Amino acid sequence: MKQASVTMEVGSDGVAVITFSNPPVNALALTVFDGFKEKFSEAMRRDDVKAIVVTGNGGRFSGGFDINVFEMVHKTGDISILPDASVDIFTNMIEDGKKPTVAAIEGLALGGGLELALVCHARIAAPRTQLGLPELTLGVLPGSGGTQRLPRLIGLPKALEIMLLSKPITSEEGKKLGLIDAVVPSDELLKVSRQWALDIAGRRKPWLRSLHRTDKLGSLPEVHDIINTARQQAKQTAKNMPQHQACLDVIEEGIIHGGYHGLLKESKVFKELVSTDTSKGLVHAFFAQRATTKVANVSDIGLKPRSIKKVAVIGGGLMGSGIATALILSDIYVILKEINSEYLLKGIKAIEDFAEFSDVDMVIEAVIENISLKQQIFADIEKACPPHSYERFHFDASFFPAHVMPLLEIIRTEKTSPQVILDLMTVGKTIKKVPVVVGNCTGIDQLICNFGLPLGPFQLQDLAGYGVAVATTKEFSMSFPERTFESPLVKLLIKNGRNGKSNGKGYYIYEKGSKPKPDPSVLPVVEESRRLTNIMPGGKPISVTDEEIVDMVLFPVVNEACRVLDDGVVVRASDLDIASVLGMSFPSYRKTSIEKFVCCGSGGIIFWADTIGANRVYRSLQKWSEVYGNFFRPSRFLEERATRGIPLSAPASTSSGARPRL
Ligand SMILES: C[C@H](O)CC(=O)SCCNC(=O)CCNC(=O)[C@H](O)C(C)(C)COP(=O)(O)OP(=O)(O)OC[C@H]1O[C@@H](n2cnc3c(N)ncnc32)[C@H](O)[C@@H]1OP(=O)(O)O
């Protein structure tokens, strides 16, 4: 379990080193602020402390204010949970404090992390440290004095670039700009910072308060010009994003009326922005993007990614060269094999000369969609490459150009090992993509097909057309409002020009002559639907096993079947079994992992439910209904049968509570 803490160690030199720790990026959580305030007050009080150094644990200064708190504000609507760090802690306590403070920065200082460094009286950084104010990407603005202090330290044009484009700089660049006082090797960071702090205390180095500086701001007419130009640009590049214009207003206010005034306006506007729909959407996207790396049975089983240093890309067309570019830009050694176009056209089997492939860690195939050619290439690379190296990324044409587009689809088949998925996710992240692991036929569909149904729910919906889904949802929500879950997904799909198989675009892409392929460009629509329904616990997609997915799809069917029995719509449970086999194509036999294609007694929906036990179905539904709502609420019939240990298929007379049949 990750634990946030703040520690203080006072050396015999009279320097108190305050270290905050909140792995993995030392986010400034509420408890960190509390701990920091406490240690800082102690350092100020103690006579044996002459100066202070603040630093982050584990080689990373800080990734900024804890974004989970924004999420909490979005859920509760209570902005009072935001700490008033900007004035109370940062300005009054540190910047205006009676003892000098130096920031010892390593790895990264982003958002509130950099803002904390800006209030210190000097900043010492390790090489290649990332410095930035990316708050606008979360729909807010640099809210702990960043809008005021950064322009004062490095001048307005560069500060605007860093804030409006959310573009970090390195410590080396920061040194040239005057943001960083010295760049020193990591192992000297604390030593130099301590000495620097003592030098300020002894007046051997200047004691500078960033907020009081004006030397880099330029004249007022210059400021107006720069801000107005930036406003025009933001109107075009960040349409519908209130935070860009708000950020410019706050910066301007501080330059015209003074830094402290700017700070107060910054705090006020920050609170307004954090409550906007823009911020809600962007914060959700931040966590949703990170959730893509949490893959059940891959990221949670203690595997470590293998090192990928050398990659072979087969196919030097637009896609292949884009992939190669993405890899090279991330310092991965690439061998690019280009096949002769004449050979390609003739479908000739292989790329010649695989000699250099003998020590590659990964091979990426990016040739044209020609199955026999691909098969031949795979046969050849198996001979030429080390066994650990055959992997396949999917750079879909819709992600073109590959070195620019952020999404990377990793297709997981039944045979792909968790280690391979993890390696691919890691390389994906290294080349600055958002890797999304998908099943070979969208996960749920594949699992339901494996269970024995002919189509999964998504492909079935594509095939039936979305009109059916809209009409049945309407009908159900009118008749059974208490248990119908109205997902906005289908309507969103239609709004996005998807009608399923009828127009070739649904959850899958349908092209003449080829099998339906899962369409990754549907993911943003799914994401939007998730955002609107807002039912994910903690706002994050849940992680479930394959078995649970099947249960979550089929147990509600059992539940509905129980209602049908309870209402006397059908007389015998076996009638429902036959109806499910003939009408739903529910498998009459089941393929099990132990014995292939053995009749293990599915026999129909109720028969199957009895073989796995009414109690298990009941308990699962009960658990899910508590977390996800009434859609899963077990029916009266199921509850009674499960708790009394009576099979669902037993005649009505066995169950004393069942309603009398008409
Ligand atoms: C008042 C202030 O002005 C307001 C603010 O400071 S707002 C915050 C501003 N800071 C940011 O926007 C930085 C956001 N973070 C990032 O860009 C990246 O996480 C990073 C560059 C710091 C690190 O990247 P990387 O090493 O690839 O790790 P990444 O996978 O993104 O994050 C690791 C974990 O830290 C979490 N994390 C990162 N930054 C966080 C933050 N500021 N708050 C809370 N959690 C954070 C991620 O959610 C992720 O959690 P998980 O492991 O449970 O999924």
Image: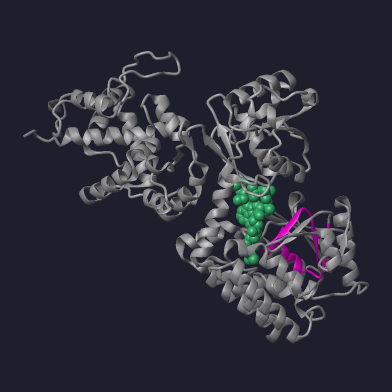
Quarter assignment of residue 88: bottom right
Q: Residue at x 9, y 34 (%)?
A: 660
Quadrant for the C terminus in the image: top left
- How many numbered circles are shown? 0
Q: Quadrant of ligand 1?
A: bottom right
Residue 645 in view in this figure: no
Q: Is residue 146 left or right of residue 627?
A: right
Quadrant where the image shows the N terminus: top right
Task: Check if residue 390 falls in the magenta segment.
Answer: no
* 91 up-or-down from 417: above or below: below
User: Which residue is painted at 74% across and 86% down in the image?
Assistant: 220
Q: Where is 410 relative to 85, above or below?
A: above
Write the start and end of the magenta stretch as one range. 102-125
Residue closer to the observer: 37 or 533: 533
Asked which colour scheme the image uses, the reply is: one colour
Does 162 sit above or below residue 366?
A: below
Q: Nearer the viewer, residue 190 or 329?
A: 329
Residue 161 lies left or right of residue 183; in this view the side is left
487 or 472, which is in the foreground? 472
Q: Nearer the viewer, residue 55 or 396?
A: 396
Task: State the image coordinates of residue 119 (x, y, percent, origin top left).
Answer: 75, 70
Residue that sits furthest to the right in the current view: 204
Q: Position of residue 324 (x, y in %)?
A: 73, 40
Residue 581 horizontal side relative to residue 53, left or right: left
Identify which residue is drawn at 52% across, 42% down. Answer: 520
Image position of 154 (left or right of 638): right
> Is residue 165 something one can see in this rendering?
yes
